[in-house]
Amino acid sequence: MSFIMDPNLFSPRVLPDKPTLISMGVTRKAAFLCIIVITFFVMAFYIAALNDHFLTSATKLSTSFRQFASDALRNAPRNHGKRRISCTEITQIVFIKTHKTASTTANSVIQRFGYNRSLSFALPKIGHHFNERQPFSHTKLQYQRPPGNQSAHFNIIASHMTYNRPELDKVVPNATYITIIRSPVQRFESAFGFFECASEVGLNERENALEEFMKKPDKYVTKIGARKGILLRNGMSNVLGFDHRYHDNDSAINEMIDKLDRELDLVLISDYFDESLVLLKNALCWKLDDLLYISKFIRTNSKRHPISESVAKKILKWNKADVKLYEHFNQSFWKKVHSYGADFYKDVSEYRTRLQEFQEDCVEMNKTQRSTDNV
C-alpha cells in the first residue's frame, strides 16, 4: 500500500525574528514524522498478522459449519419438506398392516417397489399372516435370513402381524416404520361386514344386523372367534400392540399412543389415501411411478351395513382406543402436510393425473387380455 504525502504538510512555518524557535520547530516536527512513520509500519505489520489469524480461524469455522450443515441435511427427517438437495431411496421398511384400512392396496405399492428392486421380504412360516393373537416374534419367520443371499437381514416385512418393535428390529434393522389407519366408524363397519360377524352371532336374518349388534356388543363379541374379536373392537390399536384387556383404560391408551408417536415414522390415513401416498413418496425418497396402484379387496354391497347417527355414537364409544389413536395421528398427518410445503396439493394433483392414466391403461390391457383368453 502506498501513500501520497503533501510535501508542504510538514514544512516549517516561517516565524520572523525568532530563528531559535524555527530550528526547534523543525527538529520537533521531524521527530514527530519519524514516530508517525514507525507507528504506521508497526500497525500495518500487526494488522496483517491479525488478519492472517482471523482468516485461518474463519476458514476452519467455515469448514466446520459446512460439515455440520451437511450432516444436518443428511440426518434430517425425510418427511419434513419436499425440496431436498438430494436423497437416497429407502429400502429398509416395516409396514404394520392393519385390517380394513386399505392396507392391502398400500402394501401392493410396497411389494411392487421391493419386487422391482429385487429386495428380500420376511415371510411367515405358514400362509401370509403372522399370529396376531401374540406379539410378533422373529422365530415365526419362514427363513431366519434371506435365502440365497449373503445378507444377514431382510429389507422389508409387510405381512399382517402384531407390532413388536424389538423383535422387528432384529429382522429389518434401521427400518422406516409405517402403518395405516382409518376413521374408526368406517373401519368398524367394514370389519363387521368383511369378517361376516352377523352370521357368526346369528344376526344375519336381521334387517340391520350392525344396529342390533351394537345394542349389546360385549355380549355378541364373545360369540365371535378370538382372532375376529380382537380385530373387531379397537382393531387398529390391537394390531399396533395395544393390550385388548384395557379397552377403556385412558392411561393405557395414552401410553400406547405416546409410544407409537415416538416409534413410527409415518402413519398413513386411508380416508386421504392419495395424499398419504404423496407423503410416503417424500418420506421414502421414491419416484411418482413407485406409488401407482389398483385398489384391492373392494367389498360387495351385500357386506355393507347402514350406519345411523345413534349407531355411530355407540361404535365410537365402544372403540375408545381406536378413536383416540385416530384423533392423534390425524392431527400429526396434517402437520406433515403443512411441513411438506406449498407444493403439496400440486404434487397430489400431478399424482392423481398419472394414477388415472395408469389405471385406465391397466383396465384396457385387462380387457384386451380377457378378449384374447376367450378366443
Image: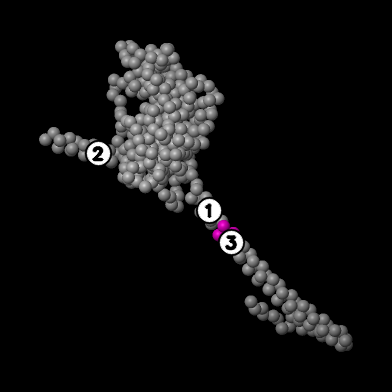
Q: Give the distance between the C-alpha atoms of the residues marked 2 and 3, in whole angstroms.
A: 58 Å
Badge 3, how many Cα within 10 Å: few under 14, some, many 20+?
few
Task: Say which residue label 3 marks.
Answer: 60
Going by the numbered disc 1, the residue's amino acid type is Ala
Distance CA(mark 3)–CA(mark 1): 14 Å
Q: Quadrant of the C terminus?
A: top left
Residue 310, above or below 274: above
Q: Quadrant of residue 316?
A: top left
Q: How many marks?
A: 3
Which residue is the site of mark 2? 362
Tell which circle, 2 or 1, labels the residue nearer the N-terminal end.
1
Q: Is residue 117 magenta?
A: no
Residue 124 falls in image quadrant: top left
| Nearer to me, 256 or 193 | 256
Q: Give the range drawn in magenta.
A: 59-64
- Name the dominant secondary structure of the magenta segment: helix
Residue furthest left as drawn: 375
Kind of residue indicated by mark 3: Lys
Mark 2–mark 1 Cα distance, whole angstroms, equals 45 Å
Report the residue at 47% width, 35% height from top. Answer: 165
- Are the residues tagged 2 and 1 within 8 Å (C-beta)? no
Q: Mark 1 points at which residue?
A: 69
